[in-house]
Amino acid sequence: MTPLLSLDAVHKRFPLGEKPGLLARAFGANKPQSMLHAVENVSFDLHPGESIGLVGESGCGKSTLVRLVTRLLDTSEGRILFNERHIGDVPAHDFARHAERARIQQVFQDPTDSLNPRFTAFDCIADPLRRLGATPLPEAKPMSAAAVKARVEEAADQVSLPRALLARYPHQLSGGQKLRVGIARGIALKPQLLILDEPTSALDVSVQAVILHLLAELRRELGLSYLFVSHDLNVVRLLCDRVMVMYLGKIVESGPVEAVFAAPKHPYTQALMAAVSKFDPDSGETRIRLTDDPQSPIDPDPHCCRFYSRCYKKQRACEQAMPERDGKSVHQVACFFPNRLDEAS
């Protein structure tokens, strides 16, 4: 099956500080500019109808990766293909009018901050329809007011948002209702890929369950593909087919959800799984305490494992070469000594 979205060796580096001036370069004081490596050599395929979870602690590069896929940021290296079209070389400021823009939509983390307080719920959902039209660009033509109204009401019905609430402003809606508005806005253009950036993190647990059920139904009914960003492993296990674990800009483990949860191989993944609350306190699960501080993402050593400073299994080889995932395996891990927690020495 041809992937809907494909990333091949994608990098994103941010320069820090000012570039050396002309005099500094002339007199040999031209130090290389420091670079923050936010995303490093990330490759994966997302197929039509598939849901992939992206997990990792704050600052690991998840949000930067999302901005690269949505073309809000330009890549430093690598290729991003969507529908077999290379969109990675389209400048971020031009992608808003690109033919594939309508097919990639996002539901944001904070439903309050992501909605314009001066817009009613109707206008929040209608805004992308008015901007991008009814069909993918460049063939798009402005939609009539009647067509916009019909599509907004259809999207509201699909997310179980009462039409009576469409006339309200965001401050007049509950957290769950605002998120439904955000989801309706995300599906209004009938995209193929919906990127969900921790959509339920600001909601009560009871509301989270309802929203997750809604997302599962929408995926099934509309044939959507999801890139689901979350720090909640239980949510990822419930909603996703595959999971990718990210640490300091690199994907350190990936595979089918059940395989990764049942037998995590990378020590960082093992630590994440061990930190999840268990229903059975007598399950015998061992907690992993990570030692030392994370390595700096600024000019990292290219020959040293990113997790080396915190790893309880580190060996000399980990300091001499960067482990990479085996692209041929279903369950991939970037570790020289992958094994289950109960087998670790």
Image: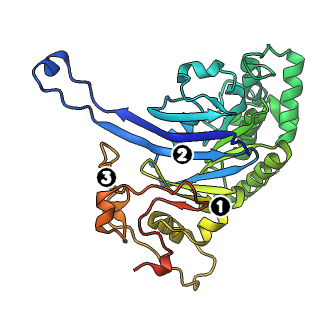
For the point 67% across and 26% down, the residue is 101
Q: Where is residue 224 shown, x and y percent of the image?
A: 77, 43
Instruction: Identify the mark nearer the N-term, 3 or 1.
Output: 1
| Cα distance between the residues tagged 3 and 1 | 29 Å
Task: Say which element carries label 3.
Answer: loop
Q: Compared with residue 196, is residue 143 higher up or lower down, i.e. above or below?
A: above
Q: Compared with residue 128, is residue 43 higher up or lower down, i.e. above or below?
A: below
For the point 77% across and 16% down, the residue is 139
Task: Please indicate whether residue 107 sits to the left or right of residue 224 in the image.
Answer: left
Inspect the image, locate mark 2, and give the three-letter code of the amino acid beneath it. Ser
Which quarter of the picture shows residue 174? top right
Inspect the image, locate mark 3, and give the three-letter code of the amino acid beneath it. His
Task: Please indicate whether residue 283 sits to the left or right of residue 37 in the image.
Answer: right
Inspect the image, locate mark 1, and give the three-letter code of the amino acid beneath it. Pro
In the picture of the structure, the residue carrying the numbered disc 3 is 303
For the point 89% across and 26% down, the residue is 150
Q: Residue furthest front?
A: 328
